Image (cartoon, grey):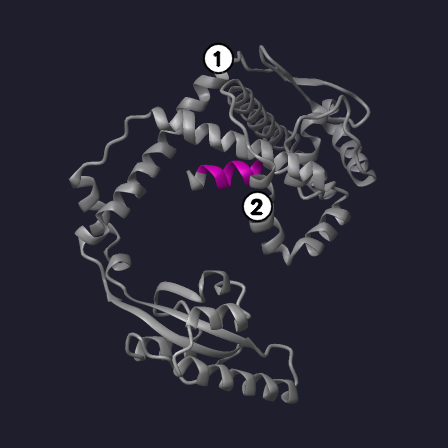
Amino acid sequence: MKKIFTVLLAASLLFVACSDKPKLTQAQIEFFKAMGEKIPYMKPDTTVVLARTSAFDIRNHDIMENVFQGMRGDITIISNVEPQRIESFIMQVVTLKAQQEVLLAEAEKEGIRITKDTVNAFIEKNLYTPNGGKEAFMEQLKIQQIDLNFVREDVRKNMLIMKYIDEVILSDLDIRVSDEEVGAYYEANKDQYQQETVSARHILFLTQGKNDQEKSVTRELAENVLERARSGEDFLLLVADYSEDPGSNTSGGLYEDFPRGRMVQAFEDASFNMKIGDISNLVETPYGYHIIKKEGHKYGFTLDEVRSEIENILVEQKKEAAFPAILDSLVEKYEYTFLL
């Protein structure tokens, strides 16, 4: 499901229900004027139905935002690429739009709902955080002339679609995984399952961008916290109070089951060479000073130890393989026809 979700969301971030003629930016108007010289039905001042279903039509203006984004707004592509190839891309966008509208209609028929809090949590985790926070993300939207409510509604609809796929379409599938399939997957991925891994918690005191005097103050603080950790203070509370690692401070500073080669060298060396339960000296990396507490050390997994994990992976793979045919049948039910 994660793969299906990622593909649909990435491809459809700007697919929402459109007004009769959505407002285009000046750059988009110039882009589609140029395209309209080769592909008349994409002229920005016309409205053309590109595809029809029993429930809705898809017009040129419904997909212009996605065509523009998909071609990176690069007007030179229109000059350098044959019209047939551009039309092939447009057909793909229209088909995806139709699929999404069908799934949305079916989800609403089933009475599926997505709460405002769920949408906000998704935006915080998947849009604000990866883009440097809310202010930075809002600045990106401003540059692209996209309204946050536009994005919020789009996220809601895509989450609605994915909930429908997960709870209705795929939940009805009777998918089974045999012992032979599990064994074959384990053998094919033996390197992954026989890796030596460590789990460790850490407290990070950032030094990036600091001058020598500031680094000295940071080190003094880190040494004080190290002394407190070794004297028996609750390590999780110290993580919550002091760690500046956004990747782990909300999970108690935990990095779980990481193999060699995943972390920076100094952090890796300390983590692998310590005994379980030990607390390290200060470990300096390009990020800053770390206090590391080793939680676990594994020397690979037997088939029985990872059997449930592999079964879940194989079930998800089979669901993903079955999904396209199910989607095609749904679209066919709506009598989808591409008109051009």
Residue 280, picture quadrant: bottom left
The residue sitting at 58% across, 83% down in the picture is 218
Where residue 29 sits in the image (x, y, percent)? 81, 34
Q: Circle 1 — which element? A: helix
Q: Circle 2 — which element? A: helix
The residue sitting at 22% across, 36% down in the picture is 177
Instruction: Say which of marks 1 and 2 sits in front.
Output: 2
Where residue 198 sits in the image (x, y, percent)? 32, 68
Whether residue 81 is visible, yes or no, is no
Q: Are marks 1 and 2 in contact (CB under 8 Å)?
A: no
**Amino acid at the residue labelled 2:** Ala
Which residue is tagged 1?
333
8 left or right, relative to 174 = right
Q: Is residue 219 magenta?
A: no
Where residue 76 sits in the image (x, y, percent)? 72, 43
Magenta stretch: give its range: 4-12
Whether residue 18 is visible, yes or no, is yes
User: Tag 2: Cα neighbours inside 10 Å, few (<14), some, or many (≥20)?
Assistant: few
Viewer-proximal residue among 63 and 224: 224
The residue sitting at 34% across, 24% down in the picture is 172
Viewer-proximal residue among 191 and 35: 191
Residue 121, disc: 2
Query: Which label's residue is closer to the chain start, 1 or 2?
Result: 2
Residue 196, disc: none
The residue sitting at 80% across, 31% down in the picture is 23
Q: Quadrant of the N terminus?
A: top left
Residue 174, picture quadrant: top left
**Amino acid at the residue labelled 1:** Lys
User: Tag 1: Cα neighbours inside 10 Å, few (<14), some, or many (≥20)?
Assistant: few
Label 1 and label 2: CA atoms lie apart by 34 Å
